[in-house]
Amino acid sequence: MTAIPFKENTVIVVFGASGDLARKKTFPALFGLFREGYLSDTTRIIGYARTKMGDEEFRSRIKEHFDLRDRSESLAVQFLKMCTYESAQYDKPEGYQKLTDGIEEFEASRGVDRPHRLFYLALPPAVFIPVAERVRKYCHPGEKGIARLIVEKPFGRDLATARELQKKLAPLWKEEELFRIDHYLGKEMVKNLIPLRFANSFLHACWNNRYISSIQISFKEPFGTEGRGGYFDSIGIIRDVIQNHLLQVLTLLAMERPVSGDAESVRNEKVHLLRAIKPLNKENVLVGQYARSEDGKKPGYLDDETVKPGSKCITYAALTLEICNERWEGVPVILRAGKALNEGKVEIRVQFKETKNGIFSHVSRNELVIRVQPNEAMYMKMNNKIPGVSNKMVVTDLDLTYSQRYNKFYIPQAYESLIRDALNDNHSNFVRDDELDISWSLFTPLLEYLEGPDGPDPVPYPYGSRGPSQLNGYLAKNGYVYQGHSGGYQWPVTTPEGAHKSKM
Ligand code: BG6
């Protein structure tokens, strides 16, 4: 990693500045960094988009999504003064030329001799390459400074289109100049996976197929595609969150220890792990599409007028991966994700093998749960004797709920964390080209089958439910032992009444 000795006078240009992503994520993240003292007030932020508007209108639009916390408005006022807006076309050189003139003028006025420019593309795929091309041509400072390009998914929709995109991008922007965002890599609990695994010898010792029986990574959202059905219809849940977010989480959870903490060492290990994943078994996939809620109040996916009538788009999927290496052979990894479910939650469940023999062979399995969101937490379900004269056992947990243990800490939003990394030129939490290529190699055959003429019809599930009713059977078939509230497990506190009620 090349160290960047300057953090002052950085210029950040956000393309697609009037769009949803920029307004809801990028600018609020930049403001969050500023509010927390991680962005210098010498930074210059420029929004660039086709929509015509002046600086003031732009400022009031982006401010709508700022998290002002308990601090005074004055920070927002100060931040907004650092922001200006450029309205121009994406396909004509004039806009870029004007942009660069403005940037150079700013840099000259600050006496900058080594420009540091960060270009953030919050853009739809159709204009992605044309903009990357023009930014390279008109706005890159060349040898005299540093330019970085932050890009967002979708990075193609299958292996061929992803490679095509990469083929066009590679001659323009070197890999070290690119930051491919997968915002899950910026989430606190995901960033904690490497420390958790490699700084705790007790976990490290049992992190293998000898002790672990299954892994589950699940993503649940309580809302449907309302408002973006048209976009989602050609994407589906596998491309939307599984091929990227959940797979990325898995790589960090299952990879070997990197030789050092630098970005390339970490990403090399992620790639090794991805290479060890067997081709996906298309027979072993559960797919669903949400229908109207049981009370009829929430619409079904097909009720969305922007969706193709009769669409077979998958809004729920559960699939099982096999990792073919010494550590993980025989441990099923279930990735599941769904829209319009009964709750919003992202979590990792690592279930340990049962205690087969001996005096405690009847007890529940240990399970390490890492709750990514909401309310970051990590807890290990374990067996314990009920306190007091009883010798009965109860399932309890070693609980690290962040809001209790770290309640004075500020947990940054994923985008804040990632933009900060990009400003520091740290690529660890960004996706490298080869990771992307392998992930598409894995998922493309499955997607072709699911979307082809022989693909199964998605199972309907009611809006607001747990997903397709076949889910429990699917999990059981793939090695996950559902223990429910067996063993008197109560979260977060075990009470004598509850514990005694349990069948032990
Ligand atoms: C995005 C998907 O990448 O991630 C969305 O396109 C999804 O469909 C979102 O809602 C989930 O992100 P988060 O941070 O809200 O869990």
Image: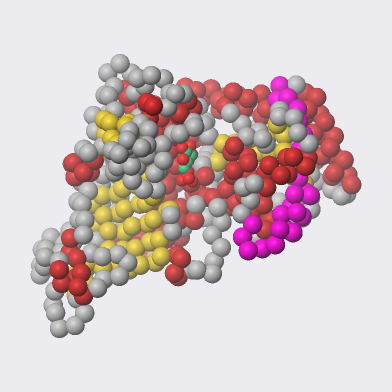
Q: How many badges with numbers are in the image?
A: 0
Specify the quadrant of the image occupied by residue 341: top left
User: Residue 448, position in %: x, y?
Assistant: 36, 22
Q: In the picture provided, is 259 more to the left or to the right than 392?
A: right
**Res. 361 in view:** no
Q: Which residues are magenta?
A: 68-91
The quadrant of the image that shows the C terminus is bottom left
Q: Is 301 one of the magenta-colored residues?
A: no
Specify the quadrant of the image occupied by residue 71: bottom right
Q: Residue at x 49, y 56 (%)?
A: 188
Figure coloring: secondary structure
Q: Residue at x 50, y 52 (%)?
A: 187
User: Residue 12, position in %: x, y?
Assistant: 72, 43
User: Residue 160, position in %: x, y?
Assistant: 47, 22
Eyeballing the image, is 394 above or below 427?
below
Q: Residue at x 63, y 40 (%)?
A: 22
Q: Is 69 one of the magenta-colored residues?
A: yes
The front one of 171 and 23 is 23
Eyeballing the image, is 252 above or below 433?
below
**Res. 304 in view:** yes
The front one of 309 and 479 is 309
User: Residue 168, position in %: x, y?
Assistant: 60, 24
Q: Single out the residue that lies furthest toward the top.
A: 453
The front one of 107 and 472 is 472
Q: Residue at x 82, y 39 (%)?
A: 103
Eyeballing the image, is 75 above or below 448?
below
The front one of 223 and 158 is 223
